[in-house]
Image: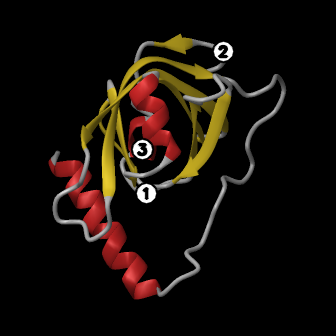
Amino acid sequence: MGNQVEPKLTEELLPLLQSERFVTIATVDHETGTPNVNAISWVFAPSQEKVRFAVDNRSRIIENINNHSGVTLNLIGNGSTYSIVGDASVIQEKMDDVPLKLALVEINIKEVRDVMFYGARIAVEPKYEKTYDANAAAKLDSQVMDSMKKA
């Protein structure tokens, strides 16, 4: 994107948000009014204009969004770092077909900005591994992603 501001996800970025991925989300803390940043992985973009994510429905993220809808997702991919700004709302307080108490949140994108500092490129994207039972993790991930896609 090279310092451009877009009103939606580009065709290059959309596929990056159509499978589980490490991103961070910044919300406005409902008690302090300061930024609150969390790492999340269950994200899915059903279109260039929207991104959905799932988190525990008791999460501070949910409390923050219920008090102030403005959020920023930070995505590292495609050789750069992107800031995805929008208004978020809880569209399901408890996701169907998922054994955990997860809320489904949808962000209506307002702008997508390449925020990588000048003269640099991301050489290796962040990777993580699940630290609990691999089979249970794969089953849960599949349930959550399927539920987000159906919403």
Q: Which quarter of the rendering shows the C terminus?
A: top left
The numbered mark at residue 139 is: none
Q: Which residue sits at x=66%, y=40%?
A: 79
The numbered mark at residue 3 is: 2
User: Relative to the observer, which residue lies in front, 44 or 92?
Assistant: 92
Local SS, label 3: helix
Q: Is residue 133 left or right of residue 139?
A: right
User: Relative to the observer, which residue lies in front, 104 or 31?
Assistant: 31
Label 2 close to label 1 by CB (< 8 Å): no
Image coordinates of residue 28 in percent, x first then y, are 58, 26
- Is there any visible trace of residue 4 in the rendered image? yes
Q: Amino acid at mark 3?
A: Leu
User: Relative to the observer, which residue lies in front, 148 or 115?
Assistant: 148
Q: Which residue is mark 3?
A: 17
Estimate the spatial distance between the alpha carbons at disc 3 and disc 1, rounded to whole Å.
7 Å
Q: Which residue is mark 1?
A: 20
Estimate the spatial distance between the alpha carbons at disc 2 and disc 3, rounded to whole Å.
20 Å
Q: Which residue sits at x=62%, y=66%?
A: 128
Image coordinates of residue 102 in percent, x first then y, are 33, 56
How packed mark 2 is, by other alpha carbons closer than 10 Å (few <14, some 14-19, many 20 or more), is few
Q: Is residue 121 left or right of residue 60?
A: right
